[in-house]
Structure formats: C-alpha cells, structure tokens
Amino acid sequence: MKMIPANMRDKSVSMMKAGVAAVTLILTLGASASAPDAPVDAKTPPTATPKAIKHRHWFEIGQASWYGKYFQGRKTAAGETYDMNGLTCAHRTLPLGSWIRVTNLKNRKSVFVRVNDRGPVPENRIVDLSYGAAQRVGIAGIAKVKLETVRNGDPEMAKALLAQLKMPLLPIYGQ
C-alpha cells in the first residue's frame, strides 16, 4: 500500500521537507492553543481579570558563521545527510529538531532554521548556519546575529515561518 498519493510522488523532496516543517510547527503551536482554560474560582467576581502570565523569551546574541561544501553529504548529529543549501544550523545546546529565527543584526534580515547538528567549533561563535541560511540573511563570513526560539502560541512568528516556507496559513479551528 502506498502512503503517498500519486500526485504527490512527483513533487520535489524540498516540498516534502516544507510540509514536515509546517506540520511540526502546527503541532508545536497547537499544543498551547488547545490547552484547556484554567478552572474559574467560585470566589472570584466575574468582573475580575486573571493576571497575565509572563513567559520568558529565550534569545542569544553573538557571532555566527556558516559551513558548506566540505560537509556536503556527511551525516549531521541528528543523523541526517547535510545539505548545504538547506535551512539548517549547528548549535551547541538547543535540542536537535528545534526551530530558531536567526536575525543578522547589521541588515535586519532573518531566516528560520532547524537545529540538526552540533557546533560551532570556535568558542567565540554561537551558531553555524548552513550555506543556504547564511545567504538568506546576507552573511558571507562572520556576522553578529540574534537567535530566538520558535515559541508556542506566537502567531506572528508562525506567520513569518509559514511565509518563509511559502505555504498558506490555514485558519485554526475555533478561532
């Protein structure tokens, strides 16, 4: 039994990767959106509003570099074959498979990349971008960047990531 419809078998592998990325993002963002509301306390007057919960926003600022041709086709720490033209990166501590937004602080261009490798080797750098990701944000050598994790329940970040993947934003059920 074939699991891929006949009209999809002829599509490129990059389209399949974009679909996997979109499903991962939707599941990540949907987990927080589908959580039930907190129970209402009978003693609380109906006009009282609950206190806003402050979520910590993780980010990191530092030097980024890129890696390309020499590593093309080799295995990454995640077990994937490295594609220098893909939108991936190497980070020392972020979980493999997590998504981050990388912003070049000189020109304010940003790109979403998936962590699939460990590195960078030089201690003065915080991330190694794939060649394709570095090209998107205008990095030819080393540049100062800001890293932000894709956060649950952040519709602005979700729209930006889906726009990068060139996929339509589907309405969320119940909104």
Image (spheres, helix red, strand yellow):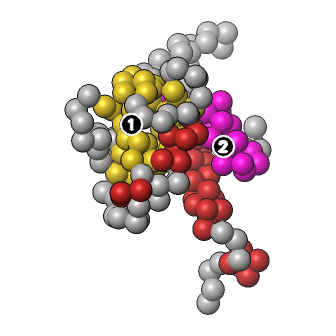
Q: Residue at x 63, y 86 (%)?
A: 2
Image-based side of 38 in relation to 172, left or right: left
Q: CA distance from mark 2 to mark 1?
A: 21 Å
The total of numbered circles placed on residues is: 2
Where is mark 2, residue-wise?
164
> In the displayed structure, would residue 112 be above or below residue 11?
above
Task: Kindly indicate the quadrant of the structure image that contains residue 10.
Answer: bottom right
Q: Quadrant of the C terminus?
A: top right
Along the horizontal axis of the image, is 21 left or right of 46? left
Point out the image quarter for the N terminus: bottom right
Residue at 47% x, 30% y is 148
Residue drawn 42% across and 24% down?
A: 144
Residue 106 in percent (x, y) is at: 52, 20
Looking at the picture, which amino acid does disc 2 mark? Gln
Q: Position of residue 42 (x, y in %)?
A: 56, 20
Magenta span contains residue 161: yes
- Residue 94 falls left or right of residue 108: left
Dot 2 crowding, Cα within 10 Å, few <14, some 14–19, many 20+: few
Category of crowding for the residue at label 1, using alpha-carbon neighbours closer than 10 angstroms: few (below 14), some (14–19), many (at least 20): many
Residue under the point 56% across and 34% down = 137
Whether residue 30 is visible, yes or no, is yes
Residue 173 % position (x, y): 74, 46
Q: Is residue 7 above or below residue 150?
A: below
> What SS does tag 1 mark?
strand
Closest to the observer: 35 or 172? 172
**Which residue in the structure is indicated by mark 1?**
65
Determine whether, in the image, residue 82 is placed left or right of residue 160: left
The range drawn in magenta is 148-170
